[in-house]
Structures are given as C-alpha cells and as structure tokens.
Image (cartoon, rainbow, N blue to C red):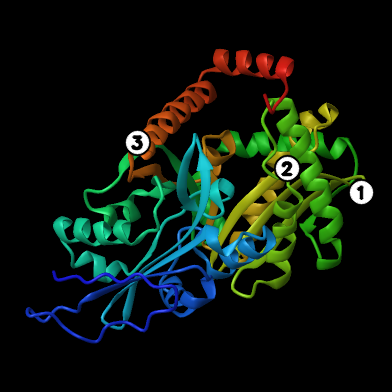
Amino acid sequence: MAQRATTQSGSNTGDRHLDASGEPLLTISVAADINEIEGAWRHLEAGGIESPGQAFEFVRTWVQALEIAPRRQVYISVHAGTKPVLVMGLGEYRRFGARVLGWLPGLHVGCNGPLIDGKYFSTLNQKQRTALWGRVLQALPPVDALHLLAVPDGLAQSFGKHGRRGVGEFVYRAEFSSWQECDRVQRTRKRRKRDRQQGAKLALLGDIEFGVARPDEYDHVLKTMFAQKAARFADLGITDPFANEKVRGFYHDIIAHSQALEAKIFVLRLNGEIVAVRYCLGRDKELYALISSMSENRELQSGSPGKQSLFRIVQTIFDEGYRSYDLGAGQADEKRNWCNREIAVAHYFFPKTATGWVFMAAQRALDFAKRKVKTDARLLTLYKRLKGRTGPDA
C-alpha cells in the first residue's frame, strides 16, 4: 500500500491521485486548531463512538473551557484519497521530565481512542496498519512519547505492531432492548428482594424524590455533586481531579452548548436534600455516566442511596428507549450487578526518544503499583493511612 505523508498547519482536502496499483494515496495532516478538521472528525463520528471523548463537541468544549494553548494541541487527520479514515485529538503535557502527547480529556472519560473508518481498516493487513501508524508517528511534532490511555482492544488493533501495552482493565456497559429484558437477565429473585429491602430502609429515613435535573437546577446540583466528590476523594486520600475550576466549568459548558450530546443529570433527594447525583451524557441510544457522587452522611448508608439511585436510573433509561448504559472503567459491585458487557481497554505507549523510554518505564511501574493497591485491601488500607498523615497531595 503506497503512502504519502504531509504535515501542515492548515486543513487538508485530501489526495485524489492513485498509486500504480490503483489504491488511494494516504495524506496525513497535522493541525493546531480542532476546527480545521471538523468535517473529517464529524464524518467519522457519525459512524459511531466508544466514548464522549471521541465526540467533536466534547473535545472542542474541553479545549475552550481549560483554555489550552494552540501550541499544546495536536490534531491528526488521515485521508485515503478524499475520504477521512482516521482522526485523533491530542494535547501536550510534561511527565517525569518528558514531553508527552495524550488524549485531551485524559481519564475524565472511561475509555478513548482514535476515530477510524472501521470498514477501511478491515481491508488492511497488519503490515499495512503498522506502516500507516508509522507514518502517523512520524508526522507528530517533536515529543518524547505518545501515551494513549484506556484504548479499547478493537481500536488498538489499528496500531498494527506499534505501541507497548500497559495496564489493562474493563469498561462496563449494560446493553438491553428494554427494562424488562434488563430486569430478567440481571436481577435474580434474591437481588429483587434486596433492592426492595434497601428501598424500604431509605423510605424510613424520609421523603424520596428522584428525577432528572432541570436546566435551572444545574448550578446547585453540580455544586453539590462536586462537593460530595471532594469529600469522597479527601476520605480516600486522593487528589480531587475536579478541584480545578476550569474543569468544573467544562461540565457546565458541555451541557449548556452541546447539540450532539444530551445531558442527563439524575438526582436523588431525601427530605429535599440531594443525597446522590449521576452526571451522564447521551448520544443516540447510548448513555455515558461520567461522574457519580453520594452524600458522605453515614446515617444514610443503611438505605444505600447510591444503589437505589442507580436502580431508578437503569429502569428509567431503558424505559425511555436507551439501549446502552456505559458505567465507565474500574471494578465495582454496581457495575457487575447491572452490566452484561465488559470491554477490555489498556494504556498504550509509543516512545520516540530515550527520554520517552524512561517515561514509559516510570509510568508503567506507577500504573501497576496503583492497580496493586486498588485490588489489595491490606495495601489500600495502608495507603489511606499514609495519605492521612501526609495529605492527598504528598
């Protein structure tokens, strides 16, 4: 497969010429403004996404809300002839002394990946995919490494033989044609009884209200949600990823300005007080849960407000016509209880310099250590004790 790579700051209109074998030549372009590749991005997005992080409006709003400088933005587009076949939006940051490119929203989405034309990539063998990604890596600006977080296995196959695999985990989704199917498949008689018991215990604590927040309630609901998250992170000894006011501003902006992504902010109230929130974005018949929070009031735990809220959400969304509910990455009882599909994802490293190899070694070691702590109750307890002495930012 003949290939031709070009790097340019402006948008690309594609190459209409064919090589000697009749295959379209590939044109690879680089831009520092997401609007320059909007057409190619939206074209590929229309074919389906795995994450809100692949949505054009999500990434553009992120860049604007966080005021990311153009010099730190990199947008790659690949055309086969005039047809876009791959798009990626990346941001530059420093880590362990290395200059690194990675997904702009980072881990604020459960998974992420390049937008690709799946039909086109299915016609390529591994050698051709490896050659294509080699061209993409060459087109990148001078950095030490490309670090792509939480890429689904299906999309990672487009890398060919490029990339070193890091820590892997799963993204959990509930995919059902109706609430009745979900109820039949996921809930045993024992679970139904437990749900009723928890609901009864919660009702004994006061008046329960559940619903979707109205636009005029967004400010108060989001303020409460971020406060609940901050309290939870402080308890775990983890730095709050939502502490930055610009990050919080993004979650306001995306629900105010996005047309392709529909906001669904579910709220459970007890005696008028917000005790659980789940911030979701919907697209077509898919719904993605991005943030969940719950009151830290221990007196409410007997009623399991978080589980009761999720129970009501699942019932509501499948009744409304959604067919997929993405609960994100990481193990949790609630995900195993409701989700019938597990999507394998993993972090991928593409070192380009000696410093990039050092970065990869350090980051992989840290990632594996974090996973060990999360999956070992004794280590997690020790970690929380140490963080309690030194503070979450130590």
Q: Quadrant of the N terminus?
A: bottom left
Q: Does residue 362 lie above or below 159 as drawn? A: above
Looking at the picture, tell me which residue is in the foreground, 41 or 228: 41
Taking the view exactly as shown, the residue that stands out farthest to the bottom is: 16
**What amino acid is labelled 1 in the image?**
Gly
The residue depicted at 16 percent of the width and 83 percent of the height is: 18
Q: Residue 304 lies in what quarter of the image? A: top right
Q: Nearer the viewer, mark 2 or mark 3?
A: 3
Q: In terms of secondary structure, where does tag 3 sit?
A: helix
**Residue for badge 3:** 357
The residue depicted at 61 percent of the width and 17 percent of the height is: 383
Q: Does residue 296 lie above or below 285 as drawn? A: above
**What amino acid is labelled 2 in the image?**
Ser
Q: Residue 61 lies in what quarter of the image? A: bottom right
Q: Could you give the CA–CA distance between mark 2 and mark 3, rounded to whole angstroms?
A: 37 Å
Counting from the top left corner in percent of width and height, residue 275 is at 82, 42
In the rendered structure, find residue 272 and report the number of the disc placed on it: 1
- Is 254 placed left or right of 128 in the picture? right
